[in-house]
Image (tube, rainbow, N blue to C red):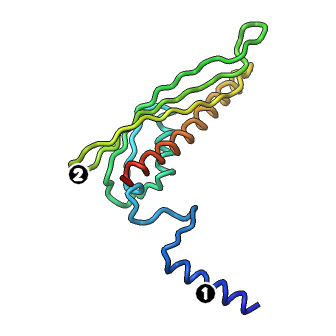
Amino acid sequence: MRAVAALALASSLLLAGCGFTPMYAETAEGSPLRRIAVSAQDDRLGYRLREQLEDALAWDRSAAPLYRLTTTIEQNRRPLGRRIDDTATRYELTVRAAWTLQPVAPGTPLTGVQSVTTTYAAADQPYAAIAAQQDGEDRAAAELAQAIRLDLMRALAE
């Protein structure tokens, strides 16, 4: 048993020395992603996107931001499927976000556009319909935040 523990300890020391970082490790302290301040439009979907982006970027509130990320969101809801009474059975929600990453210090801003589509069921009860729509918006905001994060990682790596 001690041999296994000694082998595990030795292999962890070797991995630490080579610079290995686990895929799901915490973001590095010096990562520029942690120092991006996010602003979005003042509505529910904008708030959810800002919240998701701050989580995805692991924003460090204690450090001064190096960049400011501004997003502009457009959403389009389209009914899918029809019942006999000509009401929709599902909705397709397409959310498009244009983003601009502006350095705090003088520099050239980076821009991009991402779009995601989600669907949700239409409900007859008003509360259930609102909850389904909000769930679709929340899922779209989460997907959009991950897509924007990947764009930012690519842009900052170049």
Picture disc at residue 53: none
Amino acid marked by disc 2 = Ala
Residue on which disc 1 sits: 10
Residue 71: in sight, yes or no?
Answer: no
> Which residue is depicted at the point 39% across and 54% down?
157
Q: Nearer the viewer, residue 125 or 114?
A: 114
Q: Does 84 appear above or below 10?
A: above
Would you identify the image quadrant in which residue 10 lies?
bottom right
Classify residue 66 as left or right of residue 16: left
Residue 158, percent across and down?
36, 52
Residue on which disc 2 sits: 105
Mark 1 burial class by Cα count in 10 Å: few <14, some 14-19, many 20+: few
Whole-Å distance between the Cαs marked 2 and 1?
44 Å
Classify residue 62 as left or right of residue 1: left
> Which residue is depicted at the point 64% across and 34% down?
135
Q: Nearer the viewer, residue 3 or 78?
A: 3
Residue 31, percent across and down?
40, 61
Find the residue positioned furthest to the bottom: 2
